[in-house]
Amino acid sequence: MDSMIAWFQFCIDASWFAPVCKPLWSNALLFALVIGALLFIMLLRRMVLDIRRRRAADREEARRAFVDVDAIEQIRWSGDQLKGNPELNPDLARLIRAHVKSSVRDREPLPTLNLDAGIPQR
């Protein structure tokens, strides 16, 4: 470890082109290039994400300008309001009851289970 520290101190004081210091400066340059490339990639990624976010916001704004959101809200289906209160729409409740009764009437009977044999019988 002491020899590496001495080598590093020698290379700092020596010329840049000293043959014994070439690996140190090559590694330092490589390290600086890698750090610079990583910073450039991070900056580029952030710029691309920002551009994509702005384009999505522009598309949404254009869609809202083209589509009348208030008109859609006025004609939106409000069937969930009928839940549990058939007096809100008695005709619809009557039609649903009639359909359920007719489907129960037209359905074939369910099989009875014989638990002794383990096989359903009709």
Image (cartoon, rainbow, N blue to C red):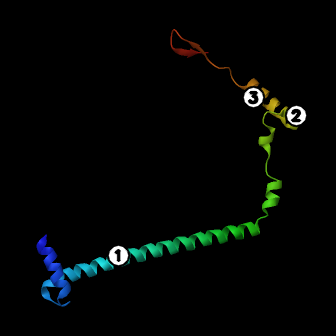
61 displayed left or right of 97: left
Residue drawn 27% across the image and 82% down it: 29
Q: CA distance from mark 2 to mark 3?
A: 23 Å
Residue closest to the eye, 79 or 52? 52
Vertical side of 3 occupied by 122: above or below: above
Q: Quadrant of residue 104?
A: top right
Numbered badge on residue 60: none
Where is residue 87 drawn, in percent x and y?
A: 88, 34
Dot 1 amino acid type: Ile
Q: Helix or strand or loop: what does disc 2 sit on?
A: helix
Residue drawn 14% across the image and 74% down it: 4
Quadrant for the N terminus, please. Answer: bottom left
Dot 2 amino acid type: Glu
Vertical side of 114 occupied by 12: above or below: below
Residue drawn 80% across the image and 55% down it: 73
Could you tell which of marks 3 and 1 lies nearer the N-terminus? 1
Could you tell which of marks 1 and 2 lies nearer the N-terminus? 1
Quadrant for the C terminus, please. Answer: top right
13 displayed left or right of 35: left
Observer-side mark, 3 or 1, equals 1
Residue drawn 79% across the image and 26% down it: 101
Observer-side mark, 1 or 2, equals 1
Numbered badge on residue 35: 1
Q: Which residue is mark 3?
A: 103
Q: Which residue is mark 2?
A: 87
